[in-house]
Amino acid sequence: MKPTPFSPYIVLAAALILPGVGQLLNRQPVRGLVFVFFTLLLGAYTLKTAAPDVSIIGKLSGGLFVYAMSIFDAYKHARIRITVWVHRKT
């Protein structure tokens, strides 16, 4: 029998702290590394290509977008995992 999945709220909190950690808690380490890689890659790209008068949020917008998507992805997969686990248990 598989171990109990983490609560979606714990996964959400972990994903808010660092990108990719929510995916690690969901037992998807490669997916987490992909999110970290693209967060850094797109953050660096927009930082390098943004105009000088753009705010720091604008300069890091590519990385922040991927980071936000990783939070949503981790929470969504945690909700699916816990729902499947509960239904298989009954």
Image (spheres, rainbow, N blue to C red):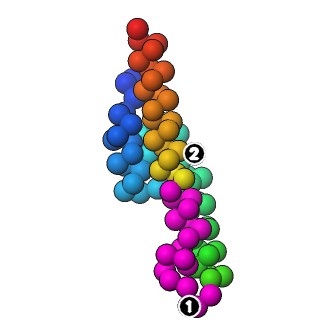
- Farthest bottom residue in view: 52
What residue would you read off at disc 2?
A: 30
* Residue appearing at x 52%, y 51% in the figure: 70
State which quarter of the image contains the N terminus: top left
- Give the residues drawn in magenta, as a range: 51-68
At which x and y percent is residue 30? 57, 45
In the rendered image, residue 58 lying in the magenta stretch gets the answer: yes
At which x and y percent is residue 61? 56, 70
The mark nearer the N terminus, 2 or 1, is: 2
In the image, 75: left or right of 65? Answer: left
Classify 10 Å Cα crowding around label 1: few (below 14), some (14-19), many (20 and above): few
Q: Which of 55 and 7 is in front in this view?
A: 55
Which residue type carries mark 2? Val
At which x and y percent is residue 31? 57, 45
In the image, 40: left or right of 25? Answer: right
Q: Is mark 2 on a helix, strand or loop?
A: helix
* Residue appearing at x 45%, y 14% in the figure: 87
Which residue type carries mark 1? Asp
Classify 10 Å Cα crowding around label 2: few (below 14), some (14-19), many (20 and above): few
At which x and y percent is residue 44? 59, 74
* Residue appearing at x 37%, y 24% in the figure: 4
Residue 52 vs 84, above or below: the answer is: below
> For the residues marked 2 and 1, what is the alpha-carbon distance in whole angstroms?
36 Å
Residue 40 vs 34, above or below: the answer is: below
**Can residue 28 be seen at all in this image of the molecule?**
yes
Q: In which quarter of the image is residue 79?
A: top left
Question: Which SS does the magenta portion mostly show?
Answer: helix
What residue would you read off at disc 1?
A: 53
* Residue appearing at x 53%, y 44% in the figure: 73
Residue 54 vs 6, above or below: the answer is: below
